[in-house]
Amino acid sequence: MTAAKLKPVDVVVVGTGVVGSILCKELADAGLKVVGLERGRMIDPQHDFAMPYAHDELKFDRHSDIFQNLSRETITFRNNMSQTALPMREMGSFKPGECVGGTAAHWGTHTRRFLPWDFETRSRTIERYGKGQIPENCTSQDWGITYEELEPYYDQFEHLYGVGGKAGNLNGEIQPGGNPFEGPRSREYPNPPAPMTYAGTLFAKAAESLGYKPHVNPTAAMTQAYLNPYKLMLGQCVRGGFCSSHGCANGAKANPLTTVIPALLKHQNFELRPLSNVIKVNLDSDRKRAVSVTYLDARGREFEQPANLIILASYTFNNTRLLLLSGIGKPYDPVSGGGVVGRNYSYQSAGKVALFFEDKAFNPFMGGGARGTSIDEFNGDNFDHSGLGFMGGAYVAVSSSGAMPIRSTPVPPGTPRWGSAWKKAATQYYHSNFTIALHGGSQSFRSHYLDLDPTYRDANGLPLLRMTFDWSENEKKMSAWITSKAAEIAKAARPSIMSVNPTAGHYSIVPYQSTHNVGGAVMGADPATSVVNKYLQAWDVANVFVIGGSAFPQNGGNPPTGTIGALACWAADSIKDLYLKRPGALV
Amino acid sequence: MPAQPHAYGYLTQPETRFLDAAVARLIPADELGPGAKEADVTCFIDRQLVSAWGTHGRNYRSGPWPEGTPEQGFQSRLTPQEIYRAAIRETNVHCIRQYQKAFEFLAAQQQDEVLHGLEDGKIEIESLPARLFFNLLLRNTLEGFFADPLYGGNRDKIGWKLIGFPGVAASTYNDHLEKHNVPYRVEPVSILDILEERVKVDAQGYPKHVMLGQHKRADGDDSR
C-alpha cells in the first residue's frame, strides 16, 4: 500500500500520555505547528468516567478498554535467552494504556522524585564501596543528568500536576514532617499533604517507635481544588476508592486529560489525531535525519506525515519498538554486549508484609491516590550497604487506593483458596487488614533486554517486541533484607497474624505488579551505552527525541511517573532553548 | 435460596447445572450466609462468556501455542467459551468414570475431591491443563460474587453485604477518613440500584449511604 503524503508540519509527537501531552503543549506555545498522533481513542472524562459507571471494578480493573488492546499488539516474554518467548495473551503484570491520556489516564497518582543517588547509581556506588559492590553483569549506569539539573523540572511537573505533600528538604534545610532523605527541593509542594488514614497512622507510629521518620505519601490526587499553570481546574479527591486502574469521576486525578489536553485542544497550533498508530519513523538516504512518520488511521489507511522534528513519547515498549522497526540506533546484542536499542530493560521490585488484626476497622474501601505513609530509610543508598551483597533499595509504605473486593480480599497465610474456610477468612479480615509494601529499584543486567520477536507478529504483520527478564539475585537479596525490616515495623503494629513475602523465584508475567516498565532507549553520556543523550535526543538522528520511561538506564526505588514528567519538561525546555536555536546534535 | 431462572446466552442446561453445583462448593452457602450459587454466579459467567471477553476479544490470539512455563501465563488456543464447553464435558466424563454420576449429582465431599483434583492437576482432562480451567472458574466465581450486580451476579449484593463493601462510594468519605477505627457500615449501593432508581444520587452523581444499625460489628457480621 502506498501511503498518502500529508502536508508537512513542524513537529510530530507520537503518543499523548504524560510526556506527549506536555511536549505538544510546550512546543505549540513556542509557536510551532504540532500534530499529536495517538494510537488509542479519544477520552472525554465527563462521559467516559461518569458516575455511577466509574465505580465499576469489573469494567475498569478487569476489562478496561483504556488498557492496551492486546488483540492487535502485545509483547512476548521469556525469563532467559534459553527459553522461547511466548506472547502475553492477556493483561497481567502491567497495564499499559491505549487512549488519549495514555497509561496515566488510569494511574495510581504516586508522585515521588528519584533520589540524587538514582541518577549516579554506578559512580556513587563505586565511590562509596568500590567496584566490588557492583554485581556481575550489572549494566546499571549514570544517567548523564544529575538531580540538581532536573530539580527545576520536577518542580514544574509537580505544579502542573498539583501534587499534594510535605517537603522534607527545602533548599538543603530538613523540614519536620517531610521525607528527610529526599533531594533538596526549591519550594514546597503546590498542595498540602493528604489527611492520614488509620492504617497509615498505625504504620507511622510503629515506624517511629523503631526510630524511622515516616511521612505522608505525596499524591497527584488533589488534596484541594487546584488551578494549574495551564489554567485548568482540578476537583478535590473525595477518597471514594476506584482509583488505580480507573478514570476519576470528579477530575481529581492529575493526568493529561485533566492537566493538559483541554488546553491543547483549544490551541490553534495543535492538531490531535486519535486512533492513529505510528508504525515507522522514516529516515533520509544517509539515515542521519528523520523526514516523516508512517501511521495507520482508524480505517486502516496509511499516511506519511512529514515533520522537521519527531518526538517519540509513547510507552517504554512502543518507544523501543519504533526505534527497532525504524532502524534508528544499533540494536542491542546481549551476547557481544554491543549495540544499544533494547539494552537495560528493567522493572520494579517489590516485597510485602500483610497484617491481619482482630479488633480494628480500617474501612479499606476509602482511599485513592496513594493515601498513607512511608519511610525512605531503605531507599537507594540511604543506608550503608557494606557487607549486604546488593545495591539499591526500596521505600516502604502503606497506601490505600481503595480496596475493591475482587482484587483486594486478602486472607491470612494457610487459608484455602476457596470453600467455607476461605469465605470465613475473607469476611473476617476484609475490614481489618492492611499491607506494608516495598517499592524497590531494579538494577539493569546484561541479559535483561528488549528486541524484536522472531515469530509472533502484530495485526499489521510487524514483529512484536520481545522481553527477556527475570529477577536478579541483587533484587532478591535486596527485597529479602528490606522486607525483613518491614516485618519488624509490622510486628510493632501488633497484628494478630502477619505474612512476609519478599520478591523471590522467577519473575512472572501473570499477577499484576506495576506498570513501571523502563529502559530500552536509555539516556546517557556515552553513545556506546545509550540511545539518547542527556537532552533525550537520539545520538544517531538529531531531529528525533525519545522521551519516557524508556530513557531510564535502570529503575530507582520510587515510582517512575514523577521522573518521566520531569524529563518531559526538561526535554521540552532543551528543545525550545537549545535545539530550535541551532538544530543539530546538542552534544 | 434457589438460583433464579435465567435466559442463558451461551451455556447449555447441563453446563448451568454443572456450574451451579461447582460454584456452590467454591463459595458455599453456610452459617455466614448465601454463597455463589445464590448470588447467581452461573448467570454472571454466562454473560461474561457472551461478552467480548468470552471470545478473548481483547487478547492476543495468534499461534503458535506451546504450553510455556507458568511464568509465561495463559497460552491455550481456546477461548473462555471453548474452555468452559470442553472442560465441563471432560470433567463430567471423569466423574462418570470415577463415581458413575455427573458432577452435579455427586455428594459435596466428592465434588470437593473433583475440584481439588482439577486445581492440583491430579485429574487430567483432554483439551487443556485442568489447572487452567480451575483457575478460570475460581476467578470468574470471585468476580461474579463481588462485581456490581449490573453483570448478573452478586444478586442482592450478597457478596458485598457479606464482607461489608459499600459499593458505589458516597462523596462524604473525607468526613469519615480521619475517624480512626470507627467502622463504616452501610447498606451497599450498586450501579444497578442507581440505574433502577432505588437509590437517589446528589448533583455530582454520588449516592447517600444509609448506615446500618449500631449493633453491627467490624467482624463482618451484618446479618439483617
Image: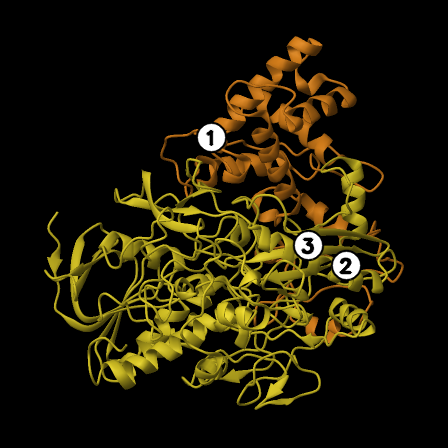
Chain colours: A yellow, B orange
Q: Amino acid at mark 2?
A: Ala
- Give the residue pinned by disc 2: A487
Q: Nearer the viewer, residue A124 or B78?
A: A124
Residue matched to label 3: A480
The label nearer to you, 3 versus 1, is 3
Q: Looking at numbered disc 3 in the image, what kind of residue is underneath it? A: Ala
Q: Report the Cα–Cα distance between label 3 and label 1.
A: 34 Å
In x, y percent, where is residue A346? 48, 56
Left or right relative to A340: residue A1: left
- Depth check: give the residue in front, A330 or A517: A330
Q: Nearer the viewer, mark 2 or mark 1?
A: 2
Residue A458 left/right relative to B198: left
- Front one among B77 and A56: B77
Does any portion of residue B13 appear in the rendered image? no
The amino acid type of the residue labelled 1 equals Ser
Between marks 3 and 2 in the image, the one whose residue lies nearer the viewer: 3
Q: Which residue is mark 1?
A: B76
Quarter-of-image position of residue B87: top right
Ranked by sequence position, the earlier of labels 3 and 2 is 3
Indicate which disc residue A387 carries.
none
Where does the C terminus of chain A fall, quadrant-wise?
bottom left
Per the model, the C-alpha gap separating discs 2 and 1 is 39 Å
Instruction: Report the chain holding disc 1.
Output: B
Percent across and percent down for residue A419 are 75, 35
On the same chain: label 2 and label 1? no
- Quadrant location of residue B29? top right
Q: Residue at x 69, y 8 (%)?
A: B100
Q: CA distance from mark 3 to mark 2?
A: 10 Å
The image shows residue B222 at horizontal and vertical percentages of: 82, 52
The correct choice, above or below, for B140 with respect to A400 in the image is above
User: On what subunit does the disc labeled 2 rest?
Assistant: A
